[in-house]
Amino acid sequence: MSDIETTRATALAELEALTDARALEQWRIRYLGKKGPVQDLMGRLKDLPAEERPGYGQDVNRLKQELVAAHAARKESLGTAPAAGARIEDFSLPGLQPLIGAFHPISRMMQEMITCMQSLGFEVAEGPEIEDEFHNFNALNIPPNHPARSESDNFYLEGNRLLRSQTSTVQIRVMESRKPPLRIIAPGRVYRPDTVDASHHYMFHQIEGLAVDRDLTMKDLKATLILFFSGLFGEDVDIRLRPNFFPFTEPSAEVDVRCVFCKGRGCPTCQQKGWIEMGGCGMVDPNVFKAVGYDPEVYTGFAFGIGIERMAMRRFGIPDIRLLTENDLRFLRQFA
């Protein structure tokens, strides 16, 4: 009986001195756990004479009930939150779900386009975003008096350098360093001082393709574009080439894709036209070949350029280009 009273006094004194929930849990394990003194006292029951066992067992049970009640009261007064810096040892608590990132819609669209072109034998090429006038204009058959070279249409830097206005500069650099045949795509950022609105931005992304070999024709260009857009929109895609002018290609054309949303009937996405303009294309101008040391009497080539934001907006139904650069998580989480 003296052991029971000693255990009661010691346990209650320690319980009163506790100051946080973590220590309270340790007290419960120490006194009421399977290896605690209360369980040890109950284990002595088998060694007592038969006539003493009922009274002794009742005393131990009263001790246990008293300590359980005291623990509950102390727990309510202390609260259940662990002390600052304490480890949570209750492994039954649910874990924290880790945040899993996702590709930005521009990155997703760019990778899809790259994959389509790689399946056609094109390789990825990259180049600097700060360029000189030769690679950005001269080599692309854009003369000094051309309006595309005006300060209002470019971000000029010191030393006759500028932020590239198209990834065609990569095509020039590749042709300067390699001989035909070649097939490359050049994805990347380009810069033009456009007024920012729902469909324009001063920084956007392009992907441009270039193929140079003997005897390439517009037929090869159109076949490549059909296969490319089929990979993006499905095998039943329909495209058309509208005559246009670009200094670095001759002949040149605009590439339109029959609207994949209304199948050509007309809808808000295609502005009721039934067709969506995707970019420009054409056969490489002989002057471009001369600028990089290719013989235009031996080689021909085709090139095309497509805006990646424009493709992403069509694919994902994004109404405003500014959403792609505002880093608003409410918008970006839709693509996770």
Image (tube, grey):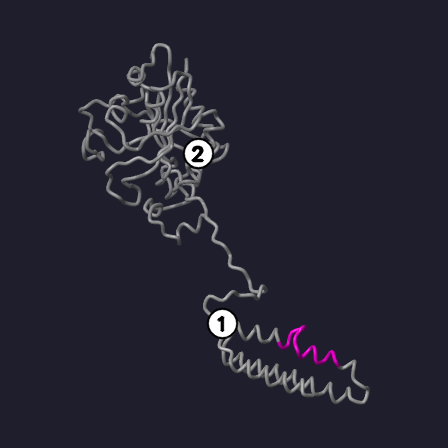
How many badges with numbers are in the image? 2
Left or right: 54 in relation to 319:
right
Q: Main secondary structure of the magenta part?
A: helix
Q: Which mark is residue 113?
A: 2
Q: Residue at x 51, y 74 (%)?
A: 21
> Where is residue 68 shown, x and y percent of the image?
61, 81
User: What segment carries the magenta color?
Assistant: 31-44
Amino acid identity at mark 1: Ala
Q: Residues within 10 Å of mark 1 (few under 14, many from 20)?
A: few
Of all residues shown, which one is farthest toward the right? Answer: 50
Q: Secondary structure at mark 2?
A: helix
**Residue nearest the observer in this picture, 20 or 171:** 20
> Where is residue 167 shown, x and y percent of the image?
33, 30
* Lower position in the chain sequence, tag 2 or tag 1: 1
Q: Is residue 14 highlighted in magenta?
A: no
> Where is residue 203 shown, x and y percent of the image?
30, 39
Q: Are marks 2 and 1 in contact (CB under 8 Å)?
A: no
**Residue nearest the observer in this picture, 213 or 47:** 47
Q: Is residue 36 highlighted in magenta?
A: yes
**Residue nearest the observer in this picture, 91 or 2:** 2
Q: Which mark is residue 81?
A: 1
- Name the mark nearer the viewer: 2 or 1: 1
Left or right: 318 in relation to 87:
left
Q: Residues within 10 Å of mark 2 (few under 14, many from 20)?
A: many
33 relative to 56, above or below: above
285 relative to 209, above or below: above
Amino acid identity at mark 2: Met
Left or right: 124 in relation to 1:
left
> Where is residue 76 shown, x and y percent of the image?
52, 80
